[in-house]
Amino acid sequence: MTKRPGFAHIVNVTELNETKHGSYLHIAQPVTLKSMVVAREQASSVVDVDLIAVKHKDEDIAIPAGFRWAPPIETYAWQHFDALRDVEPRKPLPRIADIFSSLYEASDADYFIMTNADIGLLPWFYLRVANLIREGYDGMAINRRDLPKEYEGLLLDESRLELMFMLEGQRHGGFDCFVLARNTVPKLDFGNVFVGFPPVGKVINTQIERNCSRYLWLRDGGFTFHLGNDRIWQGSTSPYATENEREGAGRYVIPASRLKPRHRTDYLRRAWSRAKRSLQKRKS
């Protein structure tokens, strides 16, 4: 009998106060968490999914039923950089190494998944990842598609998740969703690279590609989505941007142009068609 794959999926959550409005996390993070619960329910007969959240020890955050906490993160990134210790306001950004370390301690699942707090999952996410693992891939980067923040005058928030599942959106080139075998984690070299500023996505992607046995970059997989495409970090002159770039130097490479998209047009058309039919049946 074939063993059911087991996933531990971690997301680094943050306190949702007024400072998060610029990043849109006050809307996006609840969408992300709810979409993870929906995707797990869709895959429950095929794959075991452990939904895990992680936060800094001093933050006060509520998570939905179905999630559990990983060990808390003890420090923020600025505490590891002399150049950031006196920079105000201090940004509550964790190091990537601390997120993966917390996940490694929390779970012995065969495969780990990490997504940003603003990356929603389409309902078939875990099913498709399980299929790709069965094909022999043990390291993946999955690019998202960008959806509008509003659709026909309606704000797209957690109350309109089914509507989001029906929208095609626009292809996006950044890295924000990763899959890897648990035994890869001790080989990864993140240094003090932290979330929130480039080149964090490229560093994670490169480290996984270098250390897994069979890697796949799904540049337009149709598995994940993001609300808007604000790129608030782009062109930043913040000391945080400068220090993260310095720390990432030597730990990433620009993805090779020879890599080609997989599972694109035909799969997306079928998936979107199924989602629309399902929503129409529920409304009728």
Image (cartoon, rainbow, N blue to C red):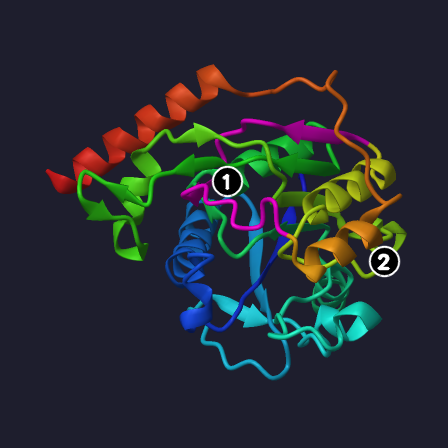
Q: Which mark lies nearer to you, 1 or 2?
A: 2
**Element on which disc 1 rests:** helix
**Element on which disc 2 rests:** loop
The span picked out in magenta is 214-236
**Residue displayed at 71% across by 49% down:** 200
Q: Quadrant of residue 134?
A: top right
Residue 4 visible to the viewer: no
Name the side, left or right, on which 11 lies relative to 257: left
Which residue is the site of mark 1?
125
As for residue 25 lying within the magenta part, the answer is: no
Q: Quadrant of residue 170?
A: top left
Kindly identify the amino acid type of the residue bearing the numbered disc 2.
Gly
Percent across and percent down for residue 171 are: 49, 28
Residue 170 numbered tag: none
Percent across and percent down for residue 10 are: 61, 59
Q: Which of the marked residues, 1 or 2, is nearer the chain's N terminus?
A: 1
Which residue is the site of mark 2?
191
**Residue displayed at 74% across by 46% down:** 204
**Residue displayed at 42% across by 73% down:** 17
Residue 248 visible to the viewer: yes
